[in-house]
Image: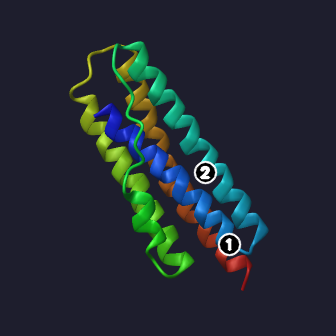
Amino acid sequence: MLNLLLESERAGAVALEQLAGEVEAEKLRRFLLGARDEEARNAQSLEALIRDNGGTPSDKVGPFAARVAALESVRDRLNLMSRGQEWVARKAEEALALAPPDPIHDYLQAMANRHRAEVEWGRAEVIRLLNADK
């Protein structure tokens, strides 16, 4: 389950990097690059958590990045990114049921909470930034 989350965080970072390169609005680009950096930090943390607990981190990138890239409009891509955040939050919450009460459990709880908050904040911020460019 941790490797699934790791691959998903990597895919999110790739998708955000690609999307930021296609956005003309500087504020929106900075927002997307900040989100990309957060996804990359999550991936690094998951890699360390897997290693520290005797596992082997996957070296794969999940299929989400390709799904985002396949969409035509920036708005559609941003909407899918938001749904992706919700999916990761749900998967982290599912993994909580399997995790013993230790650093893995604590990390998964924090990760789920961050992704839930990012969904709400991200939607509002994207709407604000898209409307500012009209």
Residue 26 location (% of width, % of height): 78, 67
Q: Which of 106 and 45 is in front in this view?
A: 45
Q: Residue at x 57, y 41 (%)?
A: 40
How would you rate the neighbour count of disc 2 (Cα within 10 Å): few for under 14, some for 14-19, many for 20 or more?
some
Look at the image and name its color scheme.
rainbow
Q: Using residue 19 as the reference point, say whether residue 65 is left or right of it.
A: left
How would you rate the neighbour count of disc 1 (Cα within 10 Å): few for under 14, some for 14-19, many for 20 or more?
some
The image shows residue 81, relative to residue 50, as above or below, that is below
Please tell me which of labels 1 and 2 falls first in the chain. Answer: 1
Of all residues shown, which one is farthest toward the front?
Answer: 59
Of all residues shown, which one is farthest toward the left?
Answer: 98
Query: Which kind of residue does numbered mark 2 sit on?
Result: Ala
Q: Which residue is drawn at 53% across and 64% down?
A: 123
Quadrant in which the C terminus is drawn? bottom right
Q: Quadrant of residue 59?
A: top left
The image's mark for residue 23 is 1
Query: Which kind of residue does numbered mark 1 sit on?
Result: Val
Residue 72 location (% of width, % of height): 49, 82
> Mark 1: which secondary structure?
loop
